[in-house]
Image: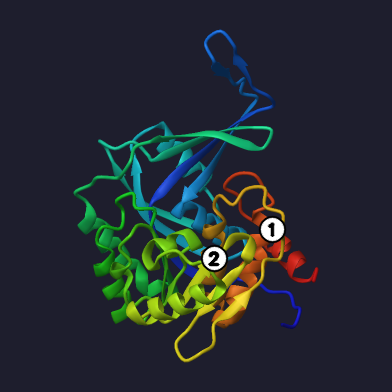
Amino acid sequence: MKKKTINFKNALVLVVGDLILDCYWYSKNHHVLSEELIPIIPINEVKEQPGGAANVAKNIAEIGGNSKIIGFIGMDHEGLILKKLMNHVRIYCDLITIKKNKTITKIRILSEKKQLIRVDFQEKYISKKIDLLYQKIFVALSYFKILVLSDYAKGTLICIKKIIDLAKKMSIPILVDPKGIDFKKYSGVSLLTPNLSEFEQIVGKCYSENDILQKGIKLLFELKLSALLVTRSKNGMTLFQPCKKPMHFPARSKIASDVTGAGDTVIAIIAASLAQGYSLEESCFYANVGASVVIKKIGTETLTIHELNSALNYQ
C-alpha cells in the first residue's frame, strides 16, 4: 500500500463495554525467603492505566479520533482513578455508577519486565440499570459513525443482542472484540476480532494455516458476519470477508515485550479508520502496524498518531 500520512480528526466512535482499571506494580528485583519459601517483592513503582473498553476509548483518542464511552463503574477509589485517567479532551465519559460493586481492577506484579502474578478484584458488574445503559446507547448512536462493543465478559454487555439489533436498524457498523465460548450472540455484526486462542475455543484447535483458513471461512458464514479478523500475535492478522480471498497481514515486529491490550489497539484503530472513511483493508493494515508499536511497550499502553504515522512510513 502507498505510504501516506493519515489522520482521524473526523472519526466519531461510540465505545460500549467493560471498564477495567489496570494496575502495574513494578519491582527491580525479587527474592525468596528461603526458610518459608515466601517470595519477597519490593515495589519500586506503581502505574495505573485504563483497561478493557476504557483502553479502546483511550486508543481512539490518542490517535486523534473522538470517542464516547458508555459502561459501568464502581462507587469507589478505583472508580475515581479510572475517571481521572480518562479525563481526555477527545473522550466523553457517560458512565453508570453501581453503589454495591467495586470497579473491576487487575493488578499485575512485574519484576525485570516479567509478570509474576495477576490479582483480580471484582469478577463482574452486577446491575439492575441495564435498561439505563441501553437508553444511553439509544440516545448516543445517531451521533456516531461506528459502534465498538468491547466484551470482557464482565457483565456490561448482557443485553448485547439487543444493542446489535438497535445499531443494525440504524445502519451503524458494529465492531466486536469477543469473549467466551458463545459467539452466536455476535451474529450479524460488521466485524468480529477474536485472537487466535479465542477463535480456537469456538472452532477447535488449528494445526495448520489451512485449518485457520477453512475454519475462518466457515465461522464467517455461520455467524453471518460482514467480516472476521483473527489476530495471531507474532503471526500477524488474517481478514475474512464473504466472496473475497482471505487477506493476511504479516506481523511488522517479531519483538513483543507485552501483548496486554494489543487487541484493544487493533479494534480502536480499525474503528477510527472506518469512521474516517478508510476501507476495511486499509483499516486492518493500519491496525496491524499500530499493534507492532504497542507490543513493544510494557503494560496496557496506547500509541499516538505521530507514532503510527512514523511506523507507517518506516517500511
Q: Position of residue 119 (x, y in %)?
A: 45, 33
Pointers 2 and 1 in contact (C-beta within 8 Å):
no
**Residue 277 seen in render:** no
Q: Residue furthest right?
A: 314
Q: Secondary structure at mark 1?
A: helix
Which kind of residue does numbered mark 1 sit on?
Val
| Residue situated in front as seen by the camera: 43 or 137 | 43
> Which residue is label 1 attached to?
293
Residue at 77 percent of width and 65 percent of height: 310
Left or right relative to 115: residue 136: left
**Residue 186 seen in render:** yes
Q: Position of residue 189 (x, y in %)?
A: 37, 75
Q: Secondary structure at mark 2?
A: strand
Q: Position of residue 247 (x, y in %)?
A: 58, 81
Q: Quadrant of the N terminus?
A: bottom right
Which numbered mark, 2 or 1, is in the foreground of this view?
A: 2
Q: Residue furthest top?
A: 35
Q: Residue furthest front?
A: 207
| Quarter occupied by residue 142 | bottom left
| Residue situated in front as seen by the camera: 86 or 292 | 292
Q: In the rendered image of this protein, does residue 240 appear above or below residue 254?
A: below
Mark nearer the N terminus (2 vs 1):
2
